[in-house]
Image (tube, grey):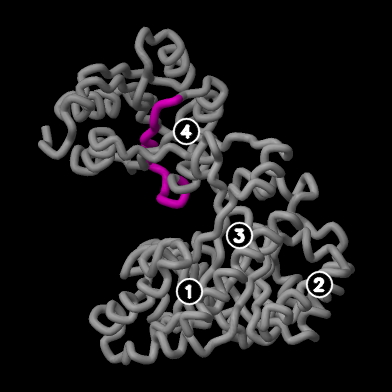
Amino acid sequence: MNQEINSTVIASINALVIDDDAFMLKIMQRILNVNGIANVTCCESGQSGLDALKQAQEKVDLILLDLNMPEMDGIQFVRQLDSEHFKGSIILISGEDERMLISAEKLVAARHIGILGHLQKPVTQEALLPLLKQLGSQTIFVPLSLKTYSAESLATAIGGGQLFNTYQPIVSLKTGKLSCVEVLVRWNHPTDGLVGPDQFIPVAEDNNLIDQLASVVLTEALEQHKKWQEMSLHIPMAINVSMENLASLEFADNFSKIMVDAGLLTKDITLEITESRAMKDPMITLDTLARLRLKRFVLSIDDFGTGHSSLAQLRDIPFDEFKIDRSFVTGAWADKRIGVMFETSLNLAKRLSMKVVAEGIESEKDWEFVRSAQCDYAQGYFIAKPMAGDALPKWLSAWGERVRRELLPETNTATLTIKASKQGTVLIIEDHEFQRRI
């Protein structure tokens, strides 16, 4: 067995292999046995697999599942696993094309079942081994089980100082210069620890708490901006505000006043719009957006193609900027489908004379891919993770050196901090990304 695999962990694994081809069952059982997994149960149908799962004396840790089977296919089997609250992990196996396997993977993840990956038939030891290593290193992907929080607990968090901001840079792909930092809110729960925005933003929107939440985020962001100004760094900002806020006819005037009172110019503020839910009143929303544009705010459409945002929004709202969702960016260099979607989105935005931001830059290959495609701006962990406000000046210095030495050797890093200190503040308003990252 490959020494990189944790033999103790592997030896304790109970595996279930389900395939209607008896020959494939023997092959997969042998591969598992050779690699240290001795406890293997083989079943020739989805139903017999379910029966074996229910009758197993010890917990099943791993299921190797064929997708295309008679009577009960793999998709139906996964549905039943969800009902059984299966806590192990799955490797999908099929002779279907890559697109089908990727779709099936996403379905497994959506049902909060651990997914190690997929294999195309015929299965080989060389292909299966990297997935088994995930078992040995205990790096199995298990989707986050979202806990439900009450409106009362969120209201307490908002009023009790449990929310805090982090800041993630967005940079120019052409020069490496800092374009802005996006403000991302987190909840430091007293018992659950760090709670992600997916778990509390919808609660705020459904219980009329979104204005209070946005106020806390904005207040802290402006205080941080003032601290940067005192350091001679006028760092541009991107602040996510829920689509619910735009349903108020008073929003344009109120928001404008807050920015002006803070010493910010409207032309330096971008409002980024995402529709994860349909507009409550399209007329009021369009009224608000039109007035914001008249006040010289810049409008940006975020996560195009992932929520309710569509060509209709591009037609009706005078957007200046186009933000491509990470699902169409990360790994686009390696996945033809994702690459086509990214390039199509980029070309659409360019033909409409819009600036483009690529989210989800997770590797140097992602960076090079979007840069070679002549995208304008980039954001992602390859550039920087969200950080505390007081960490940003140090990052800015280190980023300039990294750009000069590694990413854009022709760039003069001395201009990076200077440019950052002279630009205006950018604030981003949206819904879906606010839910996921603010």
* Location of mark 3 (residue): 433
Q: Residues within 10 Å of mark 3 (few under 14, many from 20)?
A: many
Of label 2 and label 3, which has the lower sequence position?
A: 2
Of label 1 and label 3, which has the lower sequence position?
A: 1
Quarter in which the N terminus is drawn: top left
Q: Secondary structure at mark 1?
A: strand
Labelled pair 4, 1 in contact (Cβ < 8 Å) = no
Q: Residue at x 80, y 60 (%)?
A: 279
Labelled pair 1, 2 in contact (Cβ < 8 Å) = no
Of label 2 and label 4, which has the lower sequence position?
A: 4
Residue 170 badge: 1
Of label 1 and label 2, which has the lower sequence position?
A: 1
Labelled pair 1, 3 in contact (Cβ < 8 Å) = no
Measured as percent of width and height from the top left, residue 165 is found at 55, 59
Which of the two residues, 273 or 269, is positioned nearer the viewer here? 269
Name the residue type under label 2.
Asn
The residue mark sitting in front, 2 or 4, is 2
Q: Residues within 10 Å of mark 4 (few under 14, many from 20)?
A: many
Q: Kindly report the distance in space between the C-alpha atoms of the residues bearing marks 1 and 2.
A: 27 Å
Verify whether residue 381 appears in magenta: no
- In the rendered structure, the answer to whether residue 83 lies left or right of residue 122 reads right
Of label 4 and label 1, which has the lower sequence position?
A: 4
Q: Kindly report the distance in space between the C-alpha atoms of the residues bearing marks 4 and 1.
A: 33 Å
- Which of the 4 image quarters holds residue 402? bottom left
Of label 3 and label 4, which has the lower sequence position?
A: 4
Residue 254 badge: 2
Query: In the picture shown, does residue 417 fall above or below 275?
Result: below
Measured as percent of width and height from the top left, residue 418 is found at 43, 90
Verify whether residue 95 appears in magenta: yes
Q: Which residues are magenta?
A: 87-100
